Image (cartoon, grey):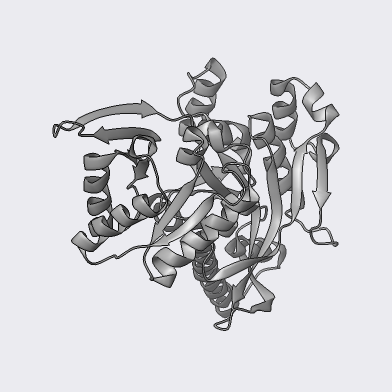
Amino acid sequence: MLAVRHLKPGCVYLLHSEDAAESKGPAQRLKRFFDNSSLVPKGATRLEPISDSNFDTIERQLDELQRREQLPLNECVVNFTGGNKLMATAAFRWAARHARAFYLERRNQLTWFAAPDGKMVTRAEQLDGGLADGLDPVALLRCQLDASEIQRPGQTLILNDAGRGLARDDLLGRLQNGADARPWLQVTGEADREAKQGDALEFAVAAALLRLGVNRIQRSLRLKAKSSMGAGTRLPHAEIDLLFTWNGRLWLVDCKDRMRAEDLAVSLKRMLPQLSPPATQLLERIRTELSISQTKVMKEDLLAVREAGGLLGNVVCVRKAELPEEVVQFARHNHIAVVQKRELVSGLRSLLHPDRPAKGSDLADLAEYFRR
């Protein structure tokens, strides 16, 4: 999508194998996205099956495609970033011989390849990740999902006039101090009718992200599983708290605004009168069991949001409670960012703007963190 947004082609051919899960299905979803967007002229995105196991056949099929469609070779470029290694290598060699090829690195670097006289020539250019910031995050998520589908797209959140009218640091400071974010948000769409404990944190995170530069945020999406016959089930199996696009990536945010389950047992112990040794042992066992259960739930949550985020998706978990060390290590190993509620603004800012020079207040917050 980044490459198409950058190059603005008149026609896109999606080369795919017959593997439904890894190639054909994703190509079909990508075609629907391009057909419903303005990135490619209407009807100019086409599916083109090719071999995934025969090198010579792939090159011959590309020859046939070029002749059949009467494509001027000097106007053709081949994106060989996807596909298995055999497909990518064959497509690259064909394009280097006859046209041009490019590869998009994860850091949004576009490298071009051409061999007009038999000698390979390369050049690189940096793509602006912000090219995709205006794309619909729900449409992008539909391209990503395979075993699931969107049951409810949720609410669209943007800053209203009052939110845009406040100075950035003023609004962010109020959010960090616990102010209700809803007066600064324009909300459209549907979510749960009954208010939930975590709603306030979700709105606060959304408002902070919007004031830090995100265009729009989708809140409270629900996913349901597809059946083997193509009809989806009625019951949702997962909910995405917040979803948005930023810097060429799809971002998912999971929010939890409650104390740790094991802390409930500790609080109960403080409230009860002097306990007998057996009762104390039982309460300690309950605390341990709650801790194990909560850790398991956290890991399941992290895996669920990571699955929806995709290979290049960014996943952020915002938590009120301190996470157990094993969960923090699990998140770090899976490239999932964890932001504590008490450091909401600075944590989100560092994720969205990692190369921003540190301010004095940032260094003071960091020093205070290490003192704690």
Query: Relative to 233, is 349 above or below?
Result: above
Asked which quadrant contains residue 235, the reply is bottom right
Considering depth in this image, is 253 or 319 the residue closer to the camera? 253
Q: Residue furthest bottom?
A: 229
Asked which quadrant contains residue 52, the reply is bottom left
Considering depth in this image, is 109 or 80 the residue closer to the camera? 80
Q: Is residue 264 left or right of residue 70?
A: right
- Identify the residue at image location x=72%, y=37%: 207
Q: Residue furthest top?
A: 360
Rendered location of residue 44, percent (x, y): 55, 49
Query: Relative to 154, is 178 above or below?
Result: above
Rendered location of residue 132, percent (x, y): 56, 38
Q: Is residue 103 left or right of residue 255?
A: left
- Identify the residue at image location x=85%, y=28%: 162
- Identify the residue at image location x=63%, y=30%: 213
* Numbered disc total: 0
Residue 253 visible from this viewpoint: no
Residue 344 visible from this viewpoint: yes
Q: Is residue 305 left or right of residue 93?
A: right
Query: Relative to 186, is 288 above or below?
Result: below
Rendered location of residue 224, percent (x, y): 63, 71
Asked which quadrant contains residue 265, the reply is bottom right
Rendered location of residue 73, percent (x, y): 33, 39
Query: Relative to 185, is 296 above or below?
Result: below
